[in-house]
Structure formats: C-alpha cells, structure tokens
Amino acid sequence: MLTKDREITDLDRKLYSDLIDFLPKILPEYVIKIPVKSIDGVTYMKKGLTSGLSIIISIAIQSDNKRWIHLSCCRRTNDSGKMRLPNYEDVIWLKDFFVSDNRKAIMIFPEKINHVNLGEVLHLFCCLDEDPLPEFSGFREDVGGGKTRSI
C-alpha cells in the first residue's frame, strides 16, 4: 500500500491505470464504488438484504515480475458493523463479477510463517500477464483434440 511517506512513481501511476482498465465500467445498482482518494486500489460495496460485502481491489508486481490483481472481501453486518467471513457464494460472485469467466483466480493458503490474518477477510489473486497455473479441472487434451477426464 502507498503511504503519504512515499512519493507516487510513474510505475505506481501505470499500475493504477492497468487496474482501472481491468475493472468493470458498468456496475449494477447493487454494487457501489466507494470514492476514496488513493492510488492504492479501488473500493466497492455490494449491497445485501442483511449485510454488505466490502471489496478492495489493488494491483502490484509480485516476485515473479508479473502484474497481479488482489481482491479482498469481507461481510459487514448491518447491526454492529462488525466483519464476518464471506461465504463461498460471495467469493464466486467476486471472481465472476470482477475477474470474469475468462481468467483464473486463486486463493492462497501460505505456510504458517507467512500467514497474515487482519480480520474476517478472504483474498483472491489474478495474474494479468499470463495464466501461470496448470490445468486443475481434471480434463486434458487427448491426441485427437478432444478432452479426456484425467482424475
């Protein structure tokens, strides 16, 4: 995250521009973009009947020298404002809406020494530069060009 202690660089501006290009241009009425004056990322709220889904989306060049989108989300309850862990449907919606059907997104469970927990938040990551992941669906191309179940 950028702080006021550090000057914004041309790379920061380029990455932010890449992030804006990546994000959906039209939002349904139940998704609100929260105006935050920051180059760190973009914040959204998905309105719900009982609680809202808070979403922060940012971009960074990671140790593989590729641009990765980072999506984080948590549920906020209406009564107390406390956070709670999003459910599976929330994460699927987040991936489908912001990442799309044409890209993979991953959730990482790091080694215990690198685990960070800052609340009831889940995170997805999506590489913008290429698909660095193998095919885990259990299907593989066979010699004739068809798909064969490998699992």
Image (cartoon, rainbow, N blue to C red):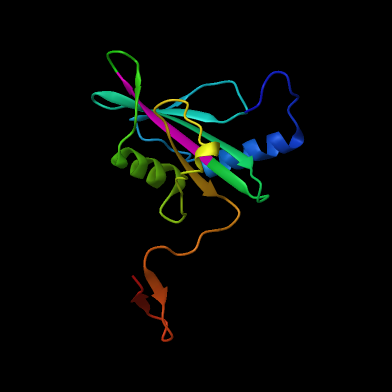
Q: Position of residue 2 (x, y in %)?
A: 66, 26
Give residue 7's quadrant in the image. top right
92 drawn magenta: no
Q: Position of residue 110 (x, y in %)?
A: 50, 43
User: Compared to 24, does 149 lie above or below?
Assistant: below
- Quarter containing the C terminus: bottom left
Residue drawn where x is 47% and y is 45% of the image: 108
User: Compared to 71, does 136 lie above or below?
Assistant: below
Residue drawn where x is 59% and y is 20% of the image: 37
Query: Is most of the magenta stretch helix, strand or loop?
Result: strand
Q: In the displayed structure, does residue 15 sit left or right of residue 131?
A: right
Which span is picked out in magenta? 70-77
- Quarter containing the N terminus: top right
Residue lying at the far top of the rendered structure: 80
Q: Nearer the viewer, residue 38 or 143?
A: 143
How many labels were placed on the picture? 0
Q: Position of residue 52 (x, y in %)?
A: 33, 25
Residue lying at the far front of the rendered structure: 113
